[in-house]
Image (cartoon, rainbow, N blue to C red):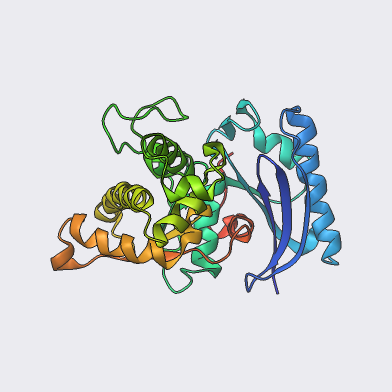
Amino acid sequence: MKYYLGLDVGGTNLVAGVVDSTYKIIAKESVSANAGRSVEEITSDMAEVSKKAVRKAGLQLDDLSSWGIGMPSCVNPKTRLLVHANNFGWKNVPIYEYLEKQIPLPVYIENDANCAAYGEVLAGAAGSYTDAVMLTLGTGVGGGIVINKKIYAGFDHMGAELGHTKLVYNGVTCTCGQKGCLESYCSSTALIRRAREAVEATPSSLVMDMCGYDKSQINGEIVFDCAKKGDTVAVRLIDEYIGYLAAGISSFITIFRPEVIILGGGMAQAGDFLLDALNERLHTCTFAAEVIGIPQVIKAKLGNDAGLIGAAFLEKSMGDGPEK
């Protein structure tokens, strides 16, 4: 049995785990990320929590094949630089150098959304497929592309930022500073923004009742629940939301022709209510759908473990590893 060490780096927590060759997590440890500290402090904690997971698994570092790390960042394995990590305020950090000093294993680093997509293809909802596109619908919109069971992120591993593809020319300003990004229309933040605007015009909406007449308490779950109950405002909001999401996904289908589309994140918890309507809408807005068909949109299965499992197996996706 081979074992792999994975680390999922989030803005809140660092979660490390030892995963066996059947994709089973046999030990897991976590620690607060405490973002805002120095690179030296955080990378030291990244190593320490990973070592704790190894000890918890009853193994030694020599028993591990590699150390894979998923980070909310852009990392170029050719230059060996972490180009940008907004959560930590890092730019152009020689991240491999810091980490290789900490743990004597081959190190592989990839964007966390790519790792989540990879994990779902290896061991989750898309386990029977080789080619998939995943969108994580939360506060923002993350994305990952897997082709032939390997992560695709462009020549410098900084592509596949699906949430920042353009959906509306000169549209709503995104957190990235650009306008009209998919994230600005398909994140939970976007739905909440539209819902707050809608209840201003129609305060009698069930949405207002469900949030205790405090529109600051509106969230995506409330809007979906009200739509399920037939509230006119909520139904309109969800129909608009699904329209934007279908438009974005239809482009990814046309470009990549994946076998399946995976939805993760908080918005995907709406389940079949979202998936059924989305799959139906895609048939009407995707190129040649009536002739060549389209892939099904399914719900992610692994939750937060997807990124950890995907990170652990980066060795398999990234081949011989980073160029030195």
The residue lying at 46 percent from left, 48 percent from top is 207
Q: Height in image: 196 above or below 136?
A: above
The residue lying at 52 percent from left, 38 percent from top is 215
Q: In this view of the protein, can residue 318 be seen by the observer? A: no
Position in image of residue 299 (x %, y %)? 46, 64
Tell whether 188 sits left or right of 286. Answer: right
The N terminus: image quadrant: bottom right
The C terminus: image quadrant: top right
Position in image of residue 181 (x %, y %)? 36, 35
Position in image of residue 287 (x %, y %)? 17, 55
Q: In this view of the protein, can residue 22 be seen by the observer? A: yes
Position in image of residue 267 (x %, y %)? 48, 53
Q: Height in image: 96 above or below 123?
A: above
The residue lying at 24 percent from left, 54 percent from top is 254
Q: Nearer the viewer, residue 238 or 229?
A: 229
The residue lying at 14 percent from left, 66 percent from top is 290
